[in-house]
Image (spheres, rainbow, N blue to C red):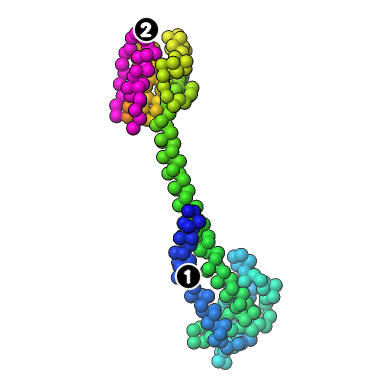
Amino acid sequence: MRKLVFFVIYTPAFLLALYLFSDNILSRIYLRNNNTKLQAIVARVETKENNNLELLLEFIYDNKKHERKVIVTRRFIESYYIGKKITVLYNDERNLFYPNDNIDKSIFNGILFLIIILPLMCSAVIHFLVFYFIDNVKNKLYDDKKTKNTFEIYKQDREYNIVSISNEKIITPEIIMKKIDLYKLENNKLLCYGIGAGKKFVELYYNDQQYSIRISNKKDEYVENVDGDIIMKYYEKVMEEMGKQD
């Protein structure tokens, strides 16, 4: 699947590269086959990006002195120096100009860049971004689904720090009795216990000799006092609010 998507992306990337960069390559191919060979002198040499060179060349054409700047590939960096005489290809009709000893290399590099390097780079980046986004969405949906189908039992201390106790696929009175210590609530050791699923939660408090349950079901939040079998009443309220997850 990913390989198919990669090649589907490669085609428009190649067509875009062809549209944007083919003119330069076609011009040099045309110059290679339609030119006048002239002698030029290197007047200046400057290093550019990727250690390529910018040459200022001086030559005579039609009894007039001309100056042209040209970028050449680094394969010939050591071959160029100020004062050196080189052969250049010149087409007056289309105003094209390039050193003879570098034109084949520049055409090859241009075609390689156009057909392989640029489209592959674009395709790889787009491919990564597309599947990174898809994977993130999948993980988010999976985590949401997992959260909705899992009951988290937690406790909150007197400093309001929440600590997860366990995650349960099902809730039973026996699990609640095992995980919740009513003694700690009654002796002011903890602020509350809670059970949450998704964005819903039901918390059990003890204040002023009275147990109360705080319920939050996404739409609203309220508190109920409870008496009798606290564990069973708490279990029933949890099931009432979260027994069937959305």
Q: Residue furthest bottom?
A: 63
How far across and down, in percent of the image, does residue 207 sit? 37, 11
How far across and down, in percent of the image, does residue 47 sit? 63, 68
User: Which residue does the image show at 51% across and 79% down from the upper left?
Assistant: 27
Amino acid type, mark 2: Gln
Residue in front for this viewpoint, 4 or 42: 4
Taking 114 as reference, is 230 left or right?
left
User: Which residue does the image show at 47% across and 26% down from the upper left?
Assistant: 167
Measured along the vertical axis of the image, is residue 35 above or below residue 223? below
Residue 78 magenta-highlighted: no
Please give the residue where the numbered disc 1 appears in the rendered image: 18
Taking 36 as reference, is 202 left or right?
left
User: Which residue does the image show at 31% across and 18% down from the upper left?
Assistant: 223
Mark positioned earlier in the residue sequence (1 or 2): 1
Please give the residue where the numbered disc 2 appears in the rendered image: 209
Residue 231 magenta-highlighted: yes
The label shown at residue 36 is: none
Magenta residue span: 219-246
Amino acid type, mark 1: Leu
Q: Nearer the viewer, mark 1 or mark 2?
A: 1
How far across and down, in percent of the image, does residue 75 sit? 66, 71
Res 152 seen here: no
CA neighbours of label 1 inside 10 A, class few (<14), some (14 to 19), many (20+): some
Residue in front for this viewpoint, 163 or 38: 163
Quick one: SS at disc 2?
Answer: loop
CA neighbours of label 2 inside 10 A, class few (<14), some (14 to 19), many (20+): few
Residue 81's image quarter?
bottom right
How far across and down, in percent of the image, does residue 13 sit? 47, 63
> What is the count of numbered marks?
2
CA separation in Å, label 1 and label 2: 80 Å
